[in-house]
Image (spheres, helix red, strand yellow):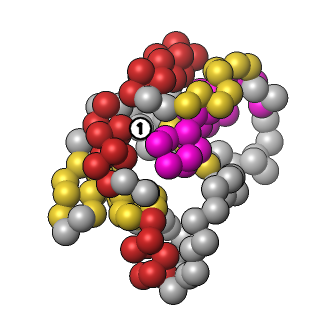
Amino acid sequence: MEQRISLVTLGVSDLGRSTAFYERLGWRGQEVEETVFFQVGGLAMVLWRRDKVAEDAGIDDSGTGGFGGMTLAQNVRSRAEVDELMAVAAAAGAEVTTPARETFYGGYAGFFTDPDGHVWEIAWNPGFPLASDGTLTVPDFGAAD
Protein backbone atom coordinates (compact mmCIF):
# COMPACT_ATOMS: atom_id res chain seq x y z
CA MET A 1 0.00 0.00 0.00
CA GLU A 2 1.27 3.47 -0.85
CA GLN A 3 2.15 5.73 2.08
CA ARG A 4 -0.34 8.51 1.39
CA ILE A 5 -3.42 10.23 2.80
CA SER A 6 -5.79 11.67 0.21
CA LEU A 7 -8.77 12.81 2.30
CA VAL A 8 -9.39 13.69 5.93
CA THR A 9 -13.09 13.55 6.80
CA LEU A 10 -14.34 15.29 9.92
CA GLY A 11 -17.64 14.04 11.28
CA VAL A 12 -19.64 17.11 12.36
CA SER A 13 -22.92 17.55 14.21
CA ASP A 14 -24.06 20.63 12.25
CA LEU A 15 -22.75 20.97 8.69
CA GLY A 16 -23.77 24.62 8.33
CA ARG A 17 -22.14 25.66 11.61
CA SER A 18 -18.91 23.83 10.79
CA THR A 19 -18.79 25.18 7.24
CA ALA A 20 -19.27 28.72 8.57
CA PHE A 21 -16.46 28.18 11.11
CA TYR A 22 -13.95 27.11 8.45
CA GLU A 23 -15.07 29.94 6.17
CA ARG A 24 -14.35 32.40 9.02
CA LEU A 25 -10.82 30.94 9.02
CA GLY A 26 -10.61 32.02 5.37
CA TRP A 27 -11.13 28.57 3.84
CA ARG A 28 -13.35 28.10 0.80
CA GLY A 29 -15.20 24.84 0.24
CA GLN A 30 -17.70 23.33 -2.14
CA GLU A 31 -20.89 21.70 -0.88
CA VAL A 32 -22.06 18.65 -2.80
CA GLU A 33 -24.87 16.41 -1.52
CA GLU A 34 -24.64 17.55 2.13
CA THR A 35 -20.84 17.19 2.12
CA VAL A 36 -18.34 20.07 2.04
CA PHE A 37 -14.96 19.61 0.33
CA PHE A 38 -11.94 21.85 0.98
CA GLN A 39 -8.76 21.61 -1.09
CA VAL A 40 -5.92 21.73 1.45
CA GLY A 41 -2.59 21.51 -0.31
CA GLY A 42 -2.22 18.13 -1.97
CA LEU A 43 -5.15 16.55 -0.15
CA ALA A 44 -8.74 17.31 0.73
CA MET A 45 -10.56 17.87 4.00
CA VAL A 46 -14.21 16.92 4.05
CA LEU A 47 -17.00 17.91 6.44
CA TRP A 48 -19.81 15.34 6.66
CA ARG A 49 -22.44 14.71 9.29
CA ARG A 50 -21.02 12.54 12.06
CA ASP A 51 -23.88 10.04 11.94
CA LYS A 52 -23.42 9.60 8.18
CA VAL A 53 -19.65 9.04 8.57
CA ALA A 54 -20.32 6.39 11.24
CA GLU A 55 -23.00 4.70 9.13
CA ASP A 56 -20.80 4.68 6.04
CA ALA A 57 -17.91 3.17 8.03
CA GLY A 58 -20.14 0.58 9.71
CA ILE A 59 -19.38 1.95 13.18
CA ASP A 60 -21.81 2.30 16.08
CA ASP A 61 -21.29 5.91 17.16
CA SER A 62 -22.63 6.46 20.65
CA GLY A 63 -22.02 10.19 20.19
CA THR A 64 -19.88 10.41 23.30
CA GLY A 65 -17.67 13.45 23.54
CA GLY A 66 -14.09 13.72 24.64
CA PHE A 67 -10.72 13.51 22.99
CA GLY A 68 -10.69 11.17 20.00
CA GLY A 69 -6.93 10.62 20.09
CA MET A 70 -6.16 12.57 16.92
CA THR A 71 -5.03 16.09 16.08
CA LEU A 72 -4.83 17.94 12.80
CA ALA A 73 -1.89 20.29 12.38
CA GLN A 74 -0.93 23.18 10.17
CA ASN A 75 2.76 23.99 10.19
CA VAL A 76 3.66 27.58 9.40
CA ARG A 77 6.83 29.54 8.67
CA SER A 78 7.22 31.65 11.84
CA ARG A 79 6.24 32.21 15.45
CA ALA A 80 4.38 35.35 14.34
CA GLU A 81 2.29 33.30 11.93
CA VAL A 82 1.35 30.92 14.77
CA ASP A 83 0.12 33.89 16.83
CA GLU A 84 -1.75 35.32 13.84
CA LEU A 85 -3.56 32.07 12.99
CA MET A 86 -4.41 31.36 16.64
CA ALA A 87 -6.02 34.83 16.83
CA VAL A 88 -7.96 34.20 13.60
CA ALA A 89 -9.20 30.85 14.97
CA ALA A 90 -10.30 32.42 18.27
CA ALA A 91 -12.13 35.20 16.41
CA ALA A 92 -13.82 32.54 14.25
CA GLY A 93 -15.21 30.86 17.37
CA ALA A 94 -12.55 28.25 18.14
CA GLU A 95 -11.88 27.28 21.73
CA VAL A 96 -8.19 27.87 22.38
CA THR A 97 -7.16 24.90 24.52
CA THR A 98 -3.44 25.74 24.73
CA PRO A 99 -2.28 29.25 23.87
CA ALA A 100 0.82 29.45 21.65
CA ARG A 101 3.99 28.72 23.60
CA GLU A 102 7.55 27.41 23.23
CA THR A 103 7.66 23.63 22.68
CA PHE A 104 9.96 20.88 23.91
CA TYR A 105 11.36 20.45 20.37
CA GLY A 106 12.48 24.07 20.02
CA GLY A 107 9.41 25.25 18.13
CA TYR A 108 6.33 27.29 18.96
CA ALA A 109 2.74 26.02 18.88
CA GLY A 110 -0.82 26.42 20.14
CA PHE A 111 -3.96 24.28 20.03
CA PHE A 112 -7.65 24.95 19.48
CA THR A 113 -10.81 22.96 18.86
CA ASP A 114 -13.38 23.55 16.14
CA PRO A 115 -17.15 23.57 16.91
CA ASP A 116 -17.24 19.75 17.00
CA GLY A 117 -14.18 19.36 19.21
CA HIS A 118 -11.71 18.41 16.47
CA VAL A 119 -8.28 19.37 17.77
CA TRP A 120 -6.02 21.59 15.65
CA GLU A 121 -2.40 22.49 16.27
CA ILE A 122 -0.80 25.54 14.67
CA ALA A 123 2.96 25.07 14.82
CA TRP A 124 6.27 26.50 13.76
CA ASN A 125 8.94 23.79 13.88
CA PRO A 126 12.47 24.75 12.81
CA GLY A 127 13.24 21.08 12.13
CA PHE A 128 10.41 20.78 9.59
CA PRO A 129 10.99 23.55 7.03
CA LEU A 130 8.25 24.16 4.50
CA ALA A 131 8.70 24.34 0.73
CA SER A 132 7.51 27.47 -1.06
CA ASP A 133 4.17 25.75 -1.77
CA GLY A 134 3.70 24.88 1.92
CA THR A 135 4.63 21.23 1.52
CA LEU A 136 6.18 19.61 4.57
CA THR A 137 8.73 16.85 4.13
CA VAL A 138 9.65 14.74 7.13
CA PRO A 139 13.41 15.07 7.66
CA ASP A 140 15.76 12.09 7.71
CA PHE A 141 16.12 11.64 11.47
CA GLY A 142 18.95 9.16 10.95
CA ALA A 143 21.13 11.59 8.98
CA ALA A 144 24.36 12.75 10.64
CA ASP A 145 24.52 16.41 11.61
Residue 37 position by quadrant: bottom left
Q: Quadrant of the N terminus?
A: bottom right
Q: Is residue 47 above or below residue 91?
A: below
Residue 101 position by quadrant: top right
| Residue depicted at 44% across the width and 29% down the height | 93
The local secondary structure at tag 1 comes to loop
Q: Pointer 1: residues within 10 angstroms few (<14), some, or many (20+)?
A: some
Residue 30 lies left or right of residue 5; in this view the side is left
Residue 87 lies left or right of residue 23; in this view the side is right
Q: Quadrant of the C terminus?
A: top right
| Residue depicted at 49% across the width and 76% down the height | 54
| Residue depicted at 49% across the width and 67% down the height | 4
Q: Residue furthest bottom?
A: 58
Residue 8 in view in this figure: no
Residue marked by disc 1: 134
**The magenta stretch spans residue 85:** no
Along the line of sight, the residue nearer the viewer: 32 or 73: 32
Along the line of sight, the residue nearer the viewer: 93 or 88: 93
Residue 97 position by quadrant: top right
Picture coordinates of residue 106, whole percent (x, y): 75, 24
| Residue depicted at 68% across the width and 27% down the height | 98
Picture coordinates of residue 132, whole percent (x, y): 38, 33
Q: Residue furthest top?
A: 80
Residue extent of the magenta highlight? 105-128
Picture coordinates of residue 85, whole percent (x, y): 46, 23
Amino acid type at circle 1 is Gly
Q: Is residue 25 above or below residue 101?
A: below
